[in-house]
Amino acid sequence: MATTMNNHHHHHHHCSSFSLMIIKLMLMLLLLIFGADAHDHQHLQPTTSHYHTLEINTLFPASVCTAATTHIQGSNKRQSTLEVLHRHGPCSQLGQDQDHATTTIPSLSEVLSHDQSRVDSIQARVKPNSDTNKIKNINSNSNRLKDKKANLPVQSGRSLGSGNYIVTIGLGTPTKTLSLIFDTGTTEVFPNFLFGCGQNNQGLFGNTAGLLGLGRNSLSIISQTAQKYGKYFSYCLPSTSSSTGHLTLSKSGVSTNVKFTPFASSQGTSFYFIDILSISVGGRQLPISQSVFTTAGSIIDSGTVITRLPPAAYSTMSAAFRKLMAKYKTAPAYSILDTCYDFTGLTTVSIPAISFTFGGNVKVDLAPSGILVAISTSRICLAFAGNNNADDVAIFGNTQQKTLGGV
């Protein structure tokens, strides 16, 4: 269920949610909800100015947890709601336990290198004729234990789910509380835990108990709870690492301010494919041919941090952004981020607005935190990266989803 945000006190922390709906005929709808109160309306009208003026310090994480003011209902017959936290923010218990005193918050460069591992893995799984998939297909009918020489990419779950968002659930009697990585790009639910059935249950998930698999195939919790919740779920990622969001499994009513974009169903994958129609920077649509997006295809993934665009789309976006940011001092590239600025000595900056238009003509204006990522005051970068190849799938990641609304 999409809740309208009740955020009198913390409207700047509100999680406008990003929503996914799943309907049995593999027709999937992605819906964008703008949970806004009166304070926010000026950001959401189409007449929005083509720039955002923001205080630089709002781009850095706070050290105190501000829980969402959204009213979260627990479970009833038709819906269940879980709180979503950033794994390394002040709202998370992970790393605060005595046994795990060694848990340290990863640096942004570690987060970005883990993010690249995940992207490589997803792109290999999406591409039908890549070498990895050829190997997997050859092996699928034979006894895999014999195939010790199969040259498969090995990734720890910990680096694939770069540890972004977690949900806490209670299981059993007496209830045992477990933290799970929240992930729309995977389908397993718990490693080494009998819930329906397990598949490829190896992997390291740090101090979490496993993954809450929200993907599209028959093993994900969405498919396994289809009878109860009708394959609908919505999520709202916290807008900052120091606030909270929610995940709701539900087939009950949807708010009227919800917008839908269809999910394309691609044979044999658990990903949510979406259509990116166009991107605008500073109020002007970028001159990117539609074939650039259709060649690659696009998915939305809650576990990828930085959105990846086809190379032609990214270079066009970056050039337009640089042009409109010409008055600011540039800074060196950082990891996968190559469009960076030095804001030393400034308290506020004015940055071009960026919006995406998805299938069904759903236009999404990104909040400033979905446009820039801050490494330090002297290095603040455009929060997008380009893929290496034109046919690598584009991925709409969680830095850009934080700023949206969701069922």
Image (spheres, helix red, strand yellow):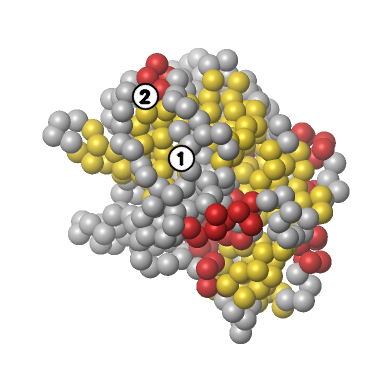
The answer to which image quadrant residue 361 occupies is top right
Q: Is residue 315 something that shows in the picture?
A: no
Tag 1: amino acid: Thr
Q: Is residue 225 above or below residue 336?
A: above
Tag 2: amino acid: Arg
Q: Is residue 237 above or below residue 59?
A: above
Residue 78 placed where, x, y %? 37, 24
Q: CA distance from mark 2 to mark 1?
A: 15 Å
Along the viewing direction, whichever of 344 and 39 lies nearer the viewer? 39
Task: Find residue 3 and name its label.
Answer: 1
Q: Which residue is under mark 2?
A: 78
Query: Residue drawn 59% across and 79% down?
Result: 347
Q: Is residue 123 above or below residue 355?
A: above
Residue 102 placed where, x, y %? 29, 62
| First in residue order: circle 2 vs circle 1 | 1
**Is there CB contact under 8 Å for labels 2 and 1?**
no
Q: Secondary structure at mark 2?
A: loop
Along the viewing direction, whichever of 123 and 170 lies nearer the viewer? 170
Q: Secondary structure at mark 1?
A: loop
